[in-house]
C-alpha cells in the first residue's frame, strides 16, 4: 500500500487476536511485568500506550516519517518541540504564525528560557538566511500561513536549515500529509494540531509530531521529552483521531474542491478587497503552491470592503457558516482573526503582518459548495 487514500484507512491496522477490524481501545494505565524490572512492550501509559501508539504510527506513516509522538494538544506538541532547545537559543519563524504559537514563544519561552525569535516573511529566503545568528538553533515554518495564506518554499528552507545545521520544523496543520509532505522536502520535524483536519470532526483536542528518518537524534530526544515533560494524548482521544484519519484523504479532496470554487466566486464579488487562497492565479505564490501542494486545502481568508459594522453584519447573516474559532472540521466555520484567533497579537503586530479588522478567515467544510456560496451571497447582500 502506497497511496494516501489507502494508507489513511489502513495505516492504523493492528493485529488482533480476536480478529477485530477496529483495534480495541486500551485504557489501562499500567501493564503486568513477568519479573521485577522485566516489562513487556508496555509498562506505564505516560511512556507508551497501545492506542496512542496506533495513532503515532498512523501519522508517521502518512507523513513518510520515522516516528510519531502524540500530545494532549497542538500547543503541547509545539511546546515539547521547543524543549529541544537549550536556554538562550534563537529561533527563526515565519512572520504570519498561528496566534497561540506566537503567544507561547513571546509570553512564555522568552521569559522562561530566554528564547529570542526573528519573524521573517516566508517568501524572503535571503531574509531567512540573513537572520541566522551564532545561537540560532531552529527554523519554524507554517505553509500556507494562518491567516494570510502565505507560502513557504519547503525545499529551499530545508536546504538553508541543513546548511546551517538548524532543526527544521513545519506546522503542517493546514495542509495535512494529503496535500504536502514536508519530510520529503528535507524537514526534520512535522507537527500538527490534530484538533483540526487530522481528527476532522471538531470533537477532539490533540497534537502530533512526526520526525524524519534523517534526524534520528531529534527522534531520540523527542521520545525522551514526551515522557519526561508528560503532556501526552489520552487513549480515547487517540482512538477518535485514528477514526477521523480514516476519511482524511477523501475529506481533504472535498475541502479543497469546495474552497477553490468559493475562492473563485469570492474574487468576482464587488464587496471584496482581496481573497487569499493559494489555488487562485492571483495569489503571488500560486506557482509555488502548484509545485508543492497536491491541492490547495480548505482555508481561505478574505478582506472585505467596509467598516467593522459591515463585517459584523455579514457574519451575522450567515446561516451555514458558523462563527467560531478552530478549523478543519467537516462543518464550515468563519472567524474574524483580529479579535478572535489572533487577539493575543498587539494592534501594531497585527498591522505589521497585515491582519486587519476587515479580514475574515473561512474554514470551508465538506457541505454542498453551491449551498455554501448561496449562504455567502445572502450574507454579502445588504
Ligand atoms: C490550532 C492550531 C495550533 C494549536 O493547536 P491546539 O490543538 O489548539 O493546541 C497550532 N498550529 C496551528 C496552525 C493551528 O491551527
Image (cartoon, rainbow, N blue to C red):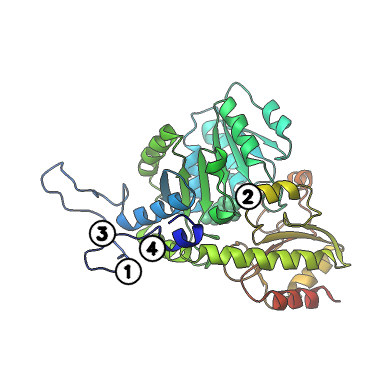
- Residue drawn at x 74%, y 77% is 375
- Write down the residue under mark 4: 239
Q: Residues within 10 Å of mark 2 (few under 14, many from 20)?
A: some
Give the distance between the C-alpha atoms of the residues marked 4 and 1, in whole angstroms. Answer: 14 Å
Give the distance between the C-alpha atoms of the residues marked 4 and 2, in whole angstroms. Answer: 26 Å
Q: Does the image show residue 346?
A: no
- For the residue labelled by badge 3, is the local secondary structure a helix, a strand or a loop? loop
- Residue drawn at x 72%, y 31% is 127
Q: Nearer the viewer, mark 2 or mark 1?
A: 1
* Labels 2 and 3: the sequence-earlier one: 3
- Write down the residue under mark 3: 28
- For the residue labelled by badge 4, is the local secondary structure a helix, a strand or a loop? helix
* Labels 2 and 1: the sequence-earlier one: 1
Position of 159 with respect to 46 (left or right) is right
* Labels 4 and 3: the sequence-earlier one: 3
Give the distance between the C-alpha atoms of the residues marked 2 and 3, in whole angstroms. Answer: 35 Å
- Write down the residue under mark 1: 21
Task: Name the quadrant containing residue 280.
Answer: bottom right
Give the distance between the C-alpha atoms of the residues marked 1 and 3, in whole angstroms. Answer: 21 Å
Q: Nearer the viewer, mark 1 or mark 3?
A: 1
State the image coordinates of residue 118 (x, y, percent, origin top left): 66, 33
Task: Name the quadrant containing residue 337.
Answer: bottom right
State the image coordinates of residue 330 (x, y, percent, origin top left): 57, 70
* Labels 1 and 3: the sequence-earlier one: 1
Q: Is mark 2 within 8 Å of ligand 1?
A: yes
- Residue drawn at x 69%, y 65% is 259
- Write down the residue under mark 2: 98
Residue contact between numbered discs 1 and 3, judged by CB atoms under 8 Å: no
Amino acid at each position: 500500500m502506497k497511496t494516501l487514500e489507502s494508507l489513511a484507512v489502513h495505516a492504523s491496522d493492528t493485529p488482533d487476536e480476536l480478529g477485530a477490524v477496529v483495534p480495541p481501545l486500551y485504557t489501562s494505565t499500567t501493564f503486568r511485568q513477568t519479573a521485577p524490572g522485566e516489562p513487556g512492550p508496555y509498562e506505564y501509559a505516560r511512556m507508551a500506550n497501545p492506542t496512542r501508539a496506533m495513532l503515532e504510527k498512523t501519522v508517521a506513516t502518512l507523513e513518510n516519517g520515522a516516528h510519531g509522538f502524540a500530545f494532549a494538544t497542538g500547543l503541547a506538541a509545539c511546546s515539547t518541540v521547543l524543549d529541544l532547545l537549550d536556554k538562550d537559543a534563537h529561533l527563526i519563524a515565519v512572520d504570519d504564525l498561528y496566534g497561540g504559537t506566537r503567544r507561547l514563544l513571546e509570553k512564555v519561552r522568552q521569559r522562561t528560557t530566554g528564547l529570542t525569535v526573528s519573524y521573517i516573511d516566508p517568501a524572503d529566503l535571503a531574509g531567512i538566511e540573513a537572520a541566522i545568528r551564532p545561537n540560532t538553533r531552529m527554523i519554524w515554518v507554517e505553509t500556507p500561513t494562518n491567516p494570510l495564506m502565505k507560502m513557504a518554499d519547503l525545499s529551499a528552507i530545508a536546504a538553508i536549515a541543513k546548511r546551517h545545521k538548524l532543526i527544521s520544523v513545519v506546522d503542517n496543520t493546514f495542509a495535512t500529509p494529503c496535500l504536502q509532505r514536508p519530510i520529503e522536502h528535507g524537514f526534520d520535524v512535522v507537527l500538527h494540531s490534530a484538533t483540526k483536519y487530522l481528527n476532522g470532526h471538531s470533537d477532539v483536542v490533540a497534537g502530533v509530531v512526526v520526525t524524519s528518518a534523517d534526524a534520528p537524534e531529534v527522534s531520540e530526544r523527542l521520545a525522551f521529552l514526551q515522557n519526561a515533560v508528560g503532556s501526552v494524548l489520552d487513549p480515547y482521544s487517540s482512538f477518535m483521531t485514528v477514526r477521523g484519519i480514516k476519511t482524511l484523504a477523501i475529506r481533504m479532496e472535498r475541502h479543497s474542491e469546495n474552497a477553490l470554487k468559493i475562492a473563485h466566486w469570492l474574487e468576482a464579488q464587488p464587496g471584496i478587497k482581496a481573497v487569499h487562497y493559494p489555488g487562485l492565479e492571483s495569489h503571488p505564490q500560486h506557482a509555488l503552491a502548484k509545485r508543492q501542494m497536491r491541492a490547495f486545502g480548505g482555508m481561505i481568508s478574505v478582506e472585505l470592503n467596509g467598516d467593522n459594522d459591515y463585517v459584523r453584519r455579514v457574519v451575522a447573516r450567515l446561516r451555514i457558516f458558523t462563527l467560531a474559532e478552530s478549523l478543519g472540521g467537516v462543518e464550515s466555520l468563519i472567524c474574524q482573526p483580529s479579535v478572535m484567533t489572533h487577539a493575543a497579537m498587539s494592534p501594531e503586530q497585527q498591522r505589521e503582518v497585515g491582519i486587519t479588522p476587515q479580514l475574515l478567515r473561512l474554514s470551508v467544510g465538506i457541505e454542498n459548495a453551491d449551498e455554501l456560496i448561496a449562504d455567502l451571497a445572502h450574507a454579502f447582500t445588504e
